[in-house]
Image: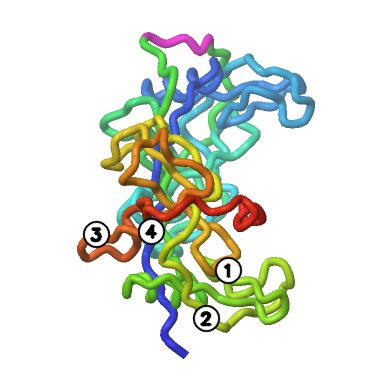
Protein backbone atom coordinates (compact mmCIF):
# COMPACT_ATOMS: atom_id res chain seq x y z
CA UNK A 1 0.00 0.00 0.00
CA UNK A 2 1.42 3.44 -0.90
CA UNK A 3 2.37 5.78 1.90
CA UNK A 4 -0.49 7.97 3.11
CA UNK A 5 0.30 11.66 3.01
CA UNK A 6 0.34 13.93 6.06
CA UNK A 7 1.34 17.54 6.59
CA UNK A 8 1.28 20.18 9.34
CA UNK A 9 -1.66 22.54 9.05
CA UNK A 10 -2.42 25.84 10.78
CA UNK A 11 -5.83 27.49 11.00
CA UNK A 12 -5.47 31.03 12.33
CA UNK A 13 -7.67 34.13 12.46
CA UNK A 14 -8.20 37.20 14.68
CA UNK A 15 -11.40 37.07 16.73
CA UNK A 16 -12.77 40.58 17.38
CA UNK A 17 -15.48 41.21 19.94
CA UNK A 18 -16.96 44.19 21.73
CA UNK A 19 -17.24 44.24 25.52
CA UNK A 20 -20.25 44.94 27.67
CA UNK A 21 -20.00 46.99 30.87
CA UNK A 22 -18.95 44.05 33.08
CA UNK A 23 -16.18 42.65 30.86
CA UNK A 24 -15.04 46.16 29.98
CA UNK A 25 -14.64 47.01 33.67
CA UNK A 26 -12.86 43.71 34.40
CA UNK A 27 -10.25 44.09 31.65
CA UNK A 28 -9.76 47.80 32.22
CA UNK A 29 -9.29 47.03 35.90
CA UNK A 30 -6.51 44.55 35.10
CA UNK A 31 -4.76 47.31 33.20
CA UNK A 32 -4.94 49.39 36.40
CA UNK A 33 -3.80 46.46 38.61
CA UNK A 34 -7.29 46.01 40.01
CA UNK A 35 -9.18 42.71 40.02
CA UNK A 36 -12.93 43.04 39.82
CA UNK A 37 -15.64 40.48 40.37
CA UNK A 38 -19.41 40.65 40.23
CA UNK A 39 -21.82 39.88 43.07
CA UNK A 40 -24.81 37.63 42.45
CA UNK A 41 -28.25 38.11 43.97
CA UNK A 42 -27.52 35.43 46.58
CA UNK A 43 -24.32 37.20 47.66
CA UNK A 44 -21.65 35.15 45.89
CA UNK A 45 -18.72 36.92 44.20
CA UNK A 46 -17.75 35.58 40.78
CA UNK A 47 -14.22 36.09 39.42
CA UNK A 48 -13.85 36.38 36.48
CA UNK A 49 -17.13 38.28 36.39
CA UNK A 50 -20.00 37.31 34.11
CA UNK A 51 -22.87 39.40 32.84
CA UNK A 52 -25.63 36.99 33.84
CA UNK A 53 -26.10 34.81 36.91
CA UNK A 54 -25.25 31.22 35.88
CA UNK A 55 -27.96 29.88 38.22
CA UNK A 56 -30.85 32.30 37.63
CA UNK A 57 -29.87 34.06 34.35
CA UNK A 58 -30.49 37.40 36.09
CA UNK A 59 -28.44 40.34 34.77
CA UNK A 60 -25.48 41.16 37.01
CA UNK A 61 -23.98 44.64 37.42
CA UNK A 62 -22.89 44.82 41.10
CA UNK A 63 -19.09 45.05 40.71
CA UNK A 64 -16.71 44.50 43.63
CA UNK A 65 -12.94 44.59 44.03
CA UNK A 66 -11.21 41.47 45.31
CA UNK A 67 -7.62 40.96 46.48
CA UNK A 68 -4.67 40.12 44.24
CA UNK A 69 -3.82 37.25 46.63
CA UNK A 70 -5.53 33.90 46.82
CA UNK A 71 -5.45 30.15 47.35
CA UNK A 72 -4.76 27.36 44.84
CA UNK A 73 -7.77 25.04 44.69
CA UNK A 74 -6.33 22.59 42.14
CA UNK A 75 -3.45 22.43 39.66
CA UNK A 76 -1.69 20.53 36.87
CA UNK A 77 1.97 20.68 35.89
CA UNK A 78 2.87 21.75 32.35
CA UNK A 79 6.36 20.40 31.54
CA UNK A 80 6.42 21.59 27.91
CA UNK A 81 4.92 25.05 27.36
CA UNK A 82 3.56 25.75 23.89
CA UNK A 83 3.72 28.88 21.77
CA UNK A 84 1.70 31.75 23.23
CA UNK A 85 1.37 30.32 26.75
CA UNK A 86 2.09 32.60 29.73
CA UNK A 87 5.59 31.30 30.49
CA UNK A 88 8.29 29.83 28.26
CA UNK A 89 9.63 27.55 31.02
CA UNK A 90 7.72 24.70 32.72
CA UNK A 91 4.94 25.97 34.99
CA UNK A 92 1.73 24.89 36.68
CA UNK A 93 -1.78 25.60 35.50
CA UNK A 94 -3.71 26.57 38.62
CA UNK A 95 -7.21 27.46 39.66
CA UNK A 96 -6.90 30.29 42.17
CA UNK A 97 -9.73 31.49 44.39
CA UNK A 98 -8.77 35.09 45.04
CA UNK A 99 -9.44 36.42 48.51
CA UNK A 100 -13.01 37.72 48.53
CA UNK A 101 -14.10 35.56 45.59
CA UNK A 102 -16.28 32.44 45.60
CA UNK A 103 -15.05 31.06 42.27
CA UNK A 104 -11.59 30.31 40.93
CA UNK A 105 -9.58 31.97 38.16
CA UNK A 106 -7.48 29.86 35.78
CA UNK A 107 -3.94 31.08 35.14
CA UNK A 108 -0.25 30.06 35.30
CA UNK A 109 1.80 29.67 38.46
CA UNK A 110 5.54 30.29 38.23
CA UNK A 111 7.09 27.52 40.35
CA UNK A 112 10.47 25.72 40.17
CA UNK A 113 8.86 22.30 39.84
CA UNK A 114 5.79 20.20 40.61
CA UNK A 115 7.10 19.45 44.10
CA UNK A 116 6.75 23.17 44.89
CA UNK A 117 3.03 23.23 44.06
CA UNK A 118 0.20 22.03 46.27
CA UNK A 119 -3.49 22.51 46.69
CA UNK A 120 -4.11 25.12 49.37
CA UNK A 121 -0.89 27.06 48.80
CA UNK A 122 -1.06 30.84 48.95
CA UNK A 123 -0.23 32.85 45.84
CA UNK A 124 -0.42 36.39 44.50
CA UNK A 125 -0.73 38.08 41.13
CA UNK A 126 2.45 39.00 39.29
CA UNK A 127 1.46 41.92 37.11
CA UNK A 128 2.86 42.35 33.61
CA UNK A 129 5.18 45.32 33.17
CA UNK A 130 3.17 46.60 30.22
CA UNK A 131 -0.60 46.26 30.47
CA UNK A 132 -3.23 46.93 27.83
CA UNK A 133 -6.50 45.66 29.26
CA UNK A 134 -6.31 41.89 28.71
CA UNK A 135 -6.08 38.74 30.82
CA UNK A 136 -2.35 38.73 29.98
CA UNK A 137 -2.02 41.81 32.20
CA UNK A 138 -1.73 39.13 34.87
CA UNK A 139 1.64 37.77 33.83
CA UNK A 140 1.18 34.78 36.16
CA UNK A 141 0.77 33.90 39.82
CA UNK A 142 3.69 33.39 42.19
CA UNK A 143 3.97 31.76 45.64
CA UNK A 144 3.26 34.22 48.44
CA UNK A 145 2.84 33.42 52.11
CA UNK A 146 0.13 35.63 53.57
CA UNK A 147 -3.11 35.54 55.49
CA UNK A 148 -6.35 35.66 53.57
CA UNK A 149 -7.63 39.17 52.92
CA UNK A 150 -11.04 40.43 53.96
CA UNK A 151 -14.31 40.86 52.14
CA UNK A 152 -14.56 42.39 48.66
CA UNK A 153 -15.17 46.11 48.42
CA UNK A 154 -17.82 47.72 46.19
CA UNK A 155 -16.42 49.27 43.00
CA UNK A 156 -18.06 51.56 40.47
CA UNK A 157 -16.30 49.89 37.54
CA UNK A 158 -15.46 53.30 36.18
CA UNK A 159 -11.98 53.99 34.81
CA UNK A 160 -10.47 56.58 32.51
CA UNK A 161 -10.16 55.41 28.91
CA UNK A 162 -12.04 52.11 29.35
CA UNK A 163 -11.33 49.11 27.16
CA UNK A 164 -14.38 48.57 24.95
CA UNK A 165 -13.22 45.81 22.60
CA UNK A 166 -10.57 43.13 22.21
CA UNK A 167 -8.93 41.22 19.38
CA UNK A 168 -8.02 37.68 20.40
CA UNK A 169 -5.92 35.62 17.98
CA UNK A 170 -7.29 32.12 17.48
CA UNK A 171 -4.90 29.45 16.20
CA UNK A 172 -5.08 25.70 15.77
CA UNK A 173 -1.95 23.70 14.87
CA UNK A 174 -2.44 20.10 13.85
CA UNK A 175 -1.23 17.41 11.48
CA UNK A 176 -3.65 16.61 8.68
CA UNK A 177 -3.76 13.29 6.83
CA UNK A 178 -6.07 13.03 3.80
CA UNK A 179 -6.29 9.24 4.07
CA UNK A 180 -5.69 6.55 1.47
CA UNK A 181 -8.30 7.66 -1.08
CA UNK A 182 -7.44 11.34 -1.16
CA UNK A 183 -3.71 10.58 -1.05
CA UNK A 184 -4.16 8.86 -4.41
CA UNK A 185 -6.22 11.80 -5.66
CA UNK A 186 -3.53 14.33 -4.65
CA UNK A 187 -0.71 12.27 -6.14
CA UNK A 188 -2.59 11.99 -9.41
CA UNK A 189 -3.09 15.77 -9.48
CA UNK A 190 0.70 16.13 -9.26
CA UNK A 191 0.77 14.26 -12.58
CA UNK A 192 -2.00 16.52 -13.97
CA UNK A 193 -4.55 13.73 -13.83
CA UNK A 194 -7.86 13.60 -11.94
CA UNK A 195 -8.72 10.29 -10.31
CA UNK A 196 -11.88 9.22 -8.52
CA UNK A 197 -13.12 5.95 -7.03
CA UNK A 198 -16.06 3.83 -8.18
CA UNK A 199 -18.59 2.33 -5.79
CA UNK A 200 -18.78 -1.46 -6.28
CA UNK A 201 -22.52 -1.37 -5.55
CA UNK A 202 -24.11 1.64 -7.28
CA UNK A 203 -21.17 2.09 -9.73
CA UNK A 204 -21.02 5.85 -9.19
CA UNK A 205 -17.62 7.54 -9.47
CA UNK A 206 -16.82 10.04 -6.73
CA UNK A 207 -14.31 12.87 -7.25
CA UNK A 208 -12.55 13.69 -4.98
CA UNK A 209 -12.71 10.11 -3.66
CA UNK A 210 -13.76 9.56 -0.06
CA UNK A 211 -12.77 5.94 0.48
CA UNK A 212 -16.42 4.96 0.83
CA UNK A 213 -19.64 5.50 -1.08
CA UNK A 214 -21.77 8.13 0.71
CA UNK A 215 -24.94 6.49 -0.69
CA UNK A 216 -24.29 2.79 -0.20
CA UNK A 217 -21.87 3.03 2.72
CA UNK A 218 -19.45 0.49 1.28
CA UNK A 219 -15.69 0.88 0.80
CA UNK A 220 -14.38 2.03 -2.58
CA UNK A 221 -10.99 1.10 -3.97
CA UNK A 222 -11.42 0.94 -7.77
CA UNK A 223 -9.67 4.00 -9.15
CA UNK A 224 -11.09 5.70 -12.23
CA UNK A 225 -9.49 8.53 -14.18
CA UNK A 226 -12.03 11.20 -15.17
CA UNK A 227 -12.02 14.38 -17.23
CA UNK A 228 -10.02 16.36 -17.95
CA UNK A 229 -12.95 18.29 -19.47
CA UNK A 230 -16.24 18.81 -17.70
CA UNK A 231 -19.49 20.72 -17.53
CA UNK A 232 -20.51 23.69 -15.38
CA UNK A 233 -23.56 22.54 -13.43
CA UNK A 234 -24.09 25.70 -11.37
CA UNK A 235 -22.04 28.71 -10.33
CA UNK A 236 -21.86 31.96 -8.38
CA UNK A 237 -20.34 35.36 -9.15
CA UNK A 238 -17.90 36.53 -6.47
CA UNK A 239 -17.85 40.30 -5.93
CA UNK A 240 -15.86 40.52 -2.67
CA UNK A 241 -12.07 40.25 -2.94
CA UNK A 242 -10.58 37.71 -0.56
CA UNK A 243 -7.56 38.68 1.50
CA UNK A 244 -4.26 37.30 0.16
CA UNK A 245 -5.96 36.03 -3.01
CA UNK A 246 -4.61 37.72 -6.13
CA UNK A 247 -7.76 37.43 -8.25
CA UNK A 248 -9.63 40.48 -9.45
CA UNK A 249 -13.35 40.63 -8.82
CA UNK A 250 -15.84 39.86 -10.12
CA UNK A 251 -14.99 36.25 -10.94
CA UNK A 252 -16.94 33.02 -11.18
CA UNK A 253 -16.68 30.01 -8.92
CA UNK A 254 -18.50 26.94 -10.19
CA UNK A 255 -19.47 23.34 -9.63
CA UNK A 256 -17.91 21.33 -12.44
CA UNK A 257 -18.90 17.76 -13.30
CA UNK A 258 -15.85 16.22 -14.93
CA UNK A 259 -16.57 13.73 -17.69
CA UNK A 260 -17.00 10.31 -16.12
CA UNK A 261 -17.64 11.62 -12.60
CA UNK A 262 -20.88 11.40 -10.63
CA UNK A 263 -20.04 14.23 -8.25
CA UNK A 264 -19.28 17.85 -9.15
CA UNK A 265 -16.17 19.52 -7.75
CA UNK A 266 -15.37 23.20 -7.21
CA UNK A 267 -13.29 25.35 -9.54
CA UNK A 268 -12.80 28.90 -10.75
CA UNK A 269 -13.85 29.76 -14.30
CA UNK A 270 -11.50 31.96 -16.38
CA UNK A 271 -10.85 32.83 -19.98
CA UNK A 272 -14.39 34.17 -20.43
CA UNK A 273 -16.23 37.28 -19.19
CA UNK A 274 -17.95 36.53 -15.90
CA UNK A 275 -21.37 37.43 -17.30
CA UNK A 276 -21.01 34.84 -20.08
CA UNK A 277 -20.56 31.86 -17.78
CA UNK A 278 -23.62 29.63 -17.86
CA UNK A 279 -24.93 26.24 -16.82
CA UNK A 280 -23.91 23.58 -19.31
CA UNK A 281 -20.72 25.41 -20.36
CA UNK A 282 -18.02 22.92 -21.35
CA UNK A 283 -14.69 23.65 -19.68
CA UNK A 284 -11.16 22.23 -19.34
CA UNK A 285 -8.44 22.68 -16.69
CA UNK A 286 -5.63 25.23 -16.99
CA UNK A 287 -2.43 24.34 -15.13
CA UNK A 288 0.28 26.77 -14.15
CA UNK A 289 3.95 25.86 -13.96
CA UNK A 290 4.81 23.58 -11.02
CA UNK A 291 1.19 23.66 -9.77
CA UNK A 292 -0.32 20.68 -7.96
CA UNK A 293 -3.88 21.44 -9.04
CA UNK A 294 -5.64 23.33 -11.84
CA UNK A 295 -5.42 27.10 -11.50
CA UNK A 296 -8.80 27.52 -13.18
CA UNK A 297 -11.06 26.10 -15.88
CA UNK A 298 -11.65 27.71 -19.30
CA UNK A 299 -14.17 27.06 -22.08
CA UNK A 300 -13.30 24.24 -24.48
CA UNK A 301 -15.21 25.76 -27.39
CA UNK A 302 -17.57 22.77 -27.56
CA UNK A 303 -21.34 23.22 -27.70
CA UNK A 304 -23.02 23.48 -24.33
CA UNK A 305 -24.01 20.22 -22.69
CA UNK A 306 -27.66 19.25 -22.72
CA UNK A 307 -29.37 19.86 -19.38
CA UNK A 308 -30.46 16.23 -19.06
CA UNK A 309 -26.79 15.12 -19.04
CA UNK A 310 -25.96 16.96 -15.82
CA UNK A 311 -29.25 17.72 -14.05
CA UNK A 312 -28.62 14.98 -11.46
CA UNK A 313 -25.29 16.61 -10.53
CA UNK A 314 -26.60 20.08 -9.66
Q: Which residue is mark 1?
A: 206
Pick whichever of labels 2 and 1 is earlier in the sequence: 1
Mark 4 or 2, which is nearer the eye? Answer: 4
Mark 4 or 3, which is nearer the eye? Answer: 4
Q: Are marks 4 and 3 in contact (CB under 8 Å)?
A: no
124 vs 199, nearest the viewer: 199
Q: Mark 2 falls on what kind of element?
A: strand
Query: How far is disc 3 from disc 1 in space, using C-alphas?
Result: 25 Å
Q: Which residue is mark 4?
A: 284
Q: Mark 1 falls on what kind of element?
A: strand
Q: Main secondary structure of the magenta part?
A: loop
Is 314 situated left or right of 279 in this image? right
Span shown in magenta: 156-160
Residue sticking out furthest to the bottom:
1
Q: Which residue is mark 2?
A: 223
7 vs 246, nearest the viewer: 246
Where residue 234 sits in the image (x, y, percent)? Answer: 54, 45
Q: Is residue 111 visible?
A: no
Amino acid sequence: MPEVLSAPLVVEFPFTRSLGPVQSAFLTGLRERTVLGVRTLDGRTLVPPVEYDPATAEELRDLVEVAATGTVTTWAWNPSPRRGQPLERPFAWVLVRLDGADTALLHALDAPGPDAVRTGMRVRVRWARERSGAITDIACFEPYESEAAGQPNPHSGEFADPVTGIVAPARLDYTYSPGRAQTGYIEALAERRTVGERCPSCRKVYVPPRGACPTCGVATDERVEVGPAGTVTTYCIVNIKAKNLDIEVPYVYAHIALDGADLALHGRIGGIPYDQVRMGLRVEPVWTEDSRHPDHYRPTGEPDADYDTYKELI
